[in-house]
Structure formats: C-alpha cells, structure tokens
Amino acid sequence: NTEMVHLDDANILNNLRRRFMKDEIYTYTANVLLAVNPYKQMQHLYTPEKVAGYRGKSAGSLPPHPYTIADTAYRHLLRERRDQALVISGESGAGKTESAKLLLRYVAQV
C-alpha cells in the first residue's frame, strides 16, 4: 500500500485481495501494518530464523511482518526507557488474538 499512487478504499481493498491470493497477508500503510486472516496455517512465516532476520531491521527493509512492528516497539522501549503500546484492531475473527500472540512471542524471544 505504501507504493500506491491513489490510496482510497477501492484500491486498498484490491491490493489486499491481490496480496491475499499470493499468500502475502501483510502490507503497510505508512507505519501501520495491515493483516488479512489467511484462514490457514502459515507457520513458515513465524520461524526462529524469521525472528532473527527481522531483529534490528527497520520497516521497509524486509517484507511487511508483525515482527517489524514488535521489533520497533522493543527498540523504542530499550532506547527511551518508556512503556510502549501496540494497537491491534479488527472485527471478530480477524485474527487479533493470533497477532497479539505473534508480537508477544517475538518480544519474548529477543
């Protein structure tokens, strides 16, 4: 989404649909991570190697992923020595609980 010329509802939804069809369930809109529930297991996205790969990387240097958001919050926590908060929003069944688990698992591992 960050590379789109026209950022309106129709284009965002079309981009999310096209990415979903390619199993690319994450995308950014500015510094906001958008996730689409794949309704299937995608464990290859959440391996220890992925954790290591996203550690210390800035958003945009790797494909969109919850680990980027978690790492950014973790680095701000260490640097600023202030509490950090992540907002996870969505409709019922959208995957909020799973997203929260991924974020917490990342922070616990690093």
Image (tube, helix red, strand yellow):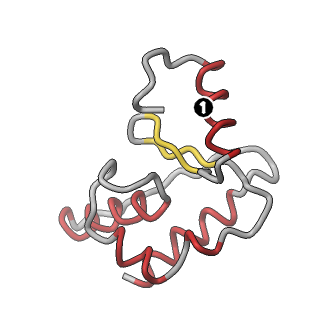
Query: Residue at point 46% right, 41% down?
Result: 28
Q: Where residue 67 appears, x then y in whole percent?
A: 44, 65
Query: Residue at point 61% right, 62% down?
Result: 99
Q: Where residue 3 appears, x then y in whole percent?
A: 40, 29
**Residue 54 location, quadrant:** bottom left
Q: Nearer the viewer, residue 75 or 45?
A: 45
Q: 25 above or below 74?
A: above
Tell me the kind of residue under disc 1.
Answer: Asn
Residue wearing tag 1: 15
Q: Is residue 95 left or right of residue 32?
A: right
Q: Where residue 97 appears, x then y in whole percent?
A: 69, 64
Query: Residue at point 67% right, 48% down?
Result: 36
Q: 106 above or below 2?
A: below
Looking at this view, name the residue that lies furthest to the left.
79
Which of the image's four quarters has the C terminus? bottom left
Q: Residues within 10 Å of mark 1 (few under 14, many from 20)?
A: some
Q: 7 above or below 34?
A: above
Q: Nearer the viewer, residue 93 or 38?
A: 38
Q: Secondary structure at mark 1?
A: helix
Q: Where residue 19 appears, x then y in whole percent?
A: 61, 42
Query: Residue at point 64% right, 48% down?
Result: 22
Looking at this view, name the residue that lies furthest to the front.
22
Total numbered labels: 1
